[in-house]
Amino acid sequence: MGATETEIRINARRKTGIMSKQYETPLIELTLGEWVEEMEAGPFAQVGYSDAEWFCILRKKEDRATTGLGQKMTYAQGNILFDIIKRRHNDPKFCFAMPEALWNGEVPVLEGDKVGQYLKSKGITGLRIYERDIFTDHAARDAKLWPLIQYLRKTPSVIIGPHRLRDLVCIGDRVHVPIVTPNLHLKPGEVENAAQAAVETLQRDGRRICLVSAGVSAAVLIDRMWELWPRCVYFDCGSIWDAFVGMGEQRQWRADLYSTPITHRAWVNINCGQ
């Protein structure tokens, strides 16, 4: 079979060099603006696997150890997360995003070959991996969210995330599906309920994109929604919206923003194209 249009576009943007010691394919670097171009082109799913997800999968912390946000990292969730990789790794429209920090020493317990070796030990080779921080945390920190916000002002969306995201007013027509945080994955049936509610809204209203901010539950939500309705874009946003609604002060850059209201307002204005 020939390459799909999505693969041709992505291959044209592929950057090399990062991760060559750990895995046979380099990270693919797409800016947030380039992801928006993919959103305009057609359906796909993007899921983030950062340190918390890999702590669950590789069992690098004690079972039910917590993140700074209070998320419990469970071995059971790790099994679910890796099952998604096993089932979806050959689907060019299901995109796995991971931060360079997993390999460059910023996360010491995971540095070196641990993630790449684990993938290869499970027979998963040639996985396309997108560098995650460039379009999530770093884009938010550096006030580079305007391309996505501009797109969302003209494209009705569904947002799955914490209750406080109901106050996110910068992006236009959106339906908010609230979830329990930070431990949705420990609430029986709640992932399925949220996925079903979001898909019903997407189908009823003809909305084209679903944004997800749900920690270690995000990939599971997106996997389920992609199964139910693979006609939309499903995009794991991580915590990029937190600073708009006063959340996430455990990250130093957000704590610094909240301590200086003038700087915070300037950050909001730049992200909103003002």
Image (cartoon, rainbow, N blue to C red):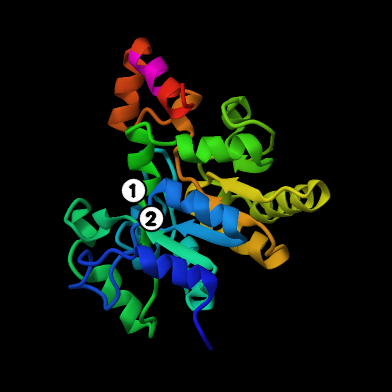
Please identify the quarter of the rendering in which residue 29 is found.
bottom left
Query: Which of 202/194 is in front?
Result: 202
Q: Is residue 135 left or right of residue 241?
A: left
Residue sticking out furthest to the bottom: 1
Residue 75 lies, with reference to residue 157, above or below; the image says below
Specify the amino acid type for callout 2: Leu
Specify the amino acid type for callout 1: Ile
| Mark before the other along the chain sequence, 2 or 1 | 2
Element at badge 2? loop
Q: Is residue 141 magenta?
A: no
Please identify the quarter of the rendering in which residue 140 is found.
top left
Residue labelled with disc 2: 30
Query: Which of 206/182 is in front?
Result: 206
Residue 134 in the image: x percent, y percent? Answer: 33, 48
Measured Cα–Cα span from mark 2 to mark 1? 7 Å
Dominant SS in magenta: helix
Q: Is residue 266 magenta?
A: yes
Q: Which label number is shown at residue 134?
A: 1
Please identify the quarter of the rendering in which residue 243 is found.
top left
Residue 269 lies, with reference to residue 112, above or below; the image says above
**Magenta segment boundaries in residue numbering:** 263-267
Whether pointer 2 and pointer 1 mark residues with C-beta atoms closer than 8 Å, the reply is yes
Element at badge 1? helix
Residue 194 lies, with reference to residue 249, above or below; the image says below
Q: Which label number is shown at residue 106?
A: none
Residue 28 in the image: x percent, y percent? Answer: 34, 63
Q: Is residue 102 left or right of residue 181?
A: left
Residue found at x 38% / y 17%: 266
Residue found at x 80% / y 46%: 205
Residue 249 in the image: x percent, y percent? Answer: 37, 27
**Residue 80 visible in image:** no
